[in-house]
Image (spheres, rainbow, N blue to C red):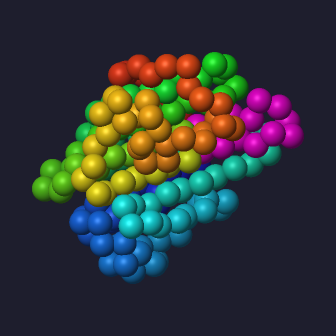
């Protein structure tokens, strides 16, 4: 399924220079794919999707890249099992705009009754976490993923989670 509307909303927020009210107004005509919950906070925007027994069906990193966004890995938590999902924290750069942080977490349903999960957090505050902040869970969407299982470590580079 297309992640384009999520990427477009992220780019609208980045253009609005953290003005969530302005960006929300500019996105009012944007339709999100079915099942996507959108929430805003002072620093940015968050997208959540879950479906029992499903695999991930979105690729926001690909949609952002196709729109000219450069994504640089800041770090990736390593979870103790593949069924815990994959997560990547990235610095996003768009010409003419302040860089922002995007975190993507994806987890296919390990069984038919557990949910597949896809979460995207974009933070436009200008705060870019270093490795110590990442390890402490201080990043957009940080902490509480993988069903409250702490990462076993962090690496600087990893494949995209989709």
Residue at position x 31%, y 57% in the image: 124
Q: In x, y percent, where is residue 159? A: 45, 24
On the image, which quarter does residue 111 sit in?
top right
On the image, which quarter does residue 70 sit in?
top left
Q: In x, y percent, where is residue 128? A: 28, 43
Compared across the picture, whether 81 is left or right of 93 comes to right
Question: Taking the image as drawn, is residue 134 in sight?
Answer: yes
Most extreme residue toward the left is 96
Query: Is 90 rendered above or below residue 11?
Result: above
Most extreme residue toward the right is 113
Query: Is 66 rendered above or below residue 37?
Result: above
Compared across the picture, whether 95 is left or right of 8 comes to left
Q: In x, y percent, where is residue 134? A: 40, 34
Residue at position x 33%, y 78% in the image: 22
Does the segment drawn in magenta span residue 30? no
Report the magenta residues as a range.
Answer: 106-118
Residue at position x 32%, y 39% in the image: 129
Q: Camera-side residue: 56 or 78? A: 78
Q: Camera-side residue: 17 or 133? A: 133
On the image, which quarter does residue 20 sit in?
bottom left
């Amino acid at each position: 399924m297309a992640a384009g509307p999520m990427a477009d909303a992220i780019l609208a927020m980045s253009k609005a220079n953290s003005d969530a009210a302005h960006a929300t107004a500019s996105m009012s005509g944007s339709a999100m794919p079915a099942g996507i919950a959108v929430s805003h906070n002072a620093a940015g925007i968050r997208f959540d999707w879950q479906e029992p027994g499903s695999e991930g069906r979105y690729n926001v990193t690909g949609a952002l890249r196709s729109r000219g966004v450069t994504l640089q890995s800041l770090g990736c938590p390593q979870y103790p099992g593949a069924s815990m999902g994959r997560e990547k924290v990235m610095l996003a750069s768009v010409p003419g705009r302040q860089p922002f942080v995007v975190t993507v977490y994806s987890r296919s349903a390990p069984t038919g009754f557990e949910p597949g999960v896809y979460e995207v957090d974009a933070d436009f505050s200008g705060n870019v976490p270093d490795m110590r902040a990442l390890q402490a869970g201080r990043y957009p969407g940080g902490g509480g993923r993988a069903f409250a299982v702490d990462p076993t470590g962090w690496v600087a580079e990893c494949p995209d989670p989709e």
